[in-house]
Amino acid sequence: MARFHPLTVAAVDRITDDSVALTFAVPAELREDYRHAAGQHLALRRTVDGTEIRRTYSICSPAPAPDGEAPRTLRVGVRLVDGGAFSTYALKEIAVGDKVEVMVPAGRFTLEPSAGLYAAVVGGSGITPVLSIVSTLLAREPDASFCLIRSDRTSASTMFLEEVADLKDRYPQRFQLVTVLSREEQQAGLPSGRLDQERLTGLLPALLPVERVAGWFLCGPLGLVEGAERALRGLGVSRSRIHEEIFHVDATPVAPSAIPAPAHSTVTARLDGRGGTWPVQDGESLLDAVLRNRPDAPYACKGGVCGTCRAFLVSGEVRMDRNFALEPEETEAGYVLACQSHPATEKVELDFDR
Ligand code: FES
């Protein structure tokens, strides 16, 4: 659940002009709590002028084997977002020795290593979780290979250049890398321009046997992920083989719902084994209704992107504003994003423990 612990910053590495990698030391007694799967993220929080700010950042370091020792450190990538309250602090203020409130790892954009061919299309800081996925997969599974297609503006703005080049050196037969730079056409030998649906539809079959790829990992800005998904679907890839994680969704206005909201509604929620029933105020999300009574309810982005607030809808109906986090099979199985859900029936029951 949403357990935070203060972790000490062990290293701050500047990786481009506008991004850093933060390494946190994990004390021995918390190591099992911070054991993570490749592709998961950490929510970090701080309070500014009485307001709590939370942001999620993907772990870029490899994940431990299930029977291996839990890591002593965790490394995340942080790219500066214009006016970003947390990323500005991370780039300009955080120093070695500082304590930062870090939530235990979460997220389902993950790959459990197994034999086969895998591929990723990433844009910008979308490389961060995929770096963990690729390095974990290739180290743990000798019969796995990976094709990484990454795009960025320029090579100077490309995060984890060295780490990705190391993978290329270490696994020349099993790791294929294609870099596309949108603002660097003059670079000899490198493709340039934007990775959109049309481009990927032509590029992917030329790079690898699309139908043999066991899992596709799409990560980056909304436009890139949507375009890559459409290209893959057009090439006959089933949705169940496509995994997505979206960064930077602008706060687009949500269309008014056709489902009328009940005049009075309550939410019953089960969280860490304890339950309760509380009124939902007009217009507020189920997450906010729960948080007023249970401040330990899990969330990070409150924007429908990170999936931290996922809950099982036990009974009643909800209307979700946006969902960029749950896969179709999760919504079909009955999961909702509490931060985006509003009651459509007088009583709604959620289970955050399932
Ligand atoms: S808190 Fe991130 S999706 Fe709800």
Image (cartoon, helix red, strand yellow):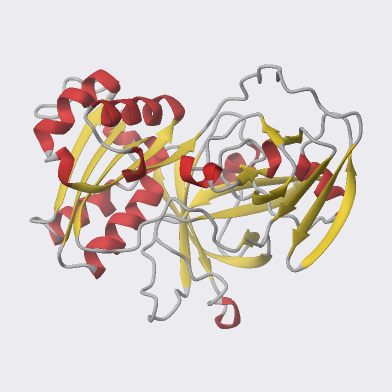
Q: Is residue 194 visible?
A: no
Quarter for ligand 1? top right
Vertical side of 75 occupied by 233: above or below:
above
Q: Residue at x 41, y 35 (%)?
A: 220
Q: Nearer the viewer, residue 241 or 333?
A: 333
Q: Residue 235, located in which quarter of the rendered image?
A: top left
Residue 10 position within the rendered picture, expressed as x and y whole percent measured from the top left: 51, 66
In this rendering, position of residue 43 left or right of residue 209: right
Q: Residue at x 52, y 32 (%)?
A: 248
Vertical side of 104 occupied by 83: above or below:
above
Q: Is residue 63 visible?
A: yes
Residue 286 position within the rendered picture, expressed as x and y whole percent measured from the top left: 77, 42
In this rendering, position of residue 201 left or right of residue 348: left
Image quarter in which the C terminus is found: bottom right
Q: Residue 65, located in which quarter of the rendered image?
A: bottom left
Q: Residue at x 49, y 71 (%)?
A: 35
Image quarter in which the N terminus is found: bottom right
- Badge count: 0
Q: Residue 280, located in which quarter of the rendered image?
A: top right
Residue 33 position within the rendered picture, expressed as x and y whole percent measured from the top left: 57, 73
Residue 311 position within the rendered picture, expressed as x and y whole percent measured from the top left: 65, 51
Q: Nearer the viewer, residue 268 or 36?
A: 268
Q: Residue at x 75, y 34 (%)?
A: 342
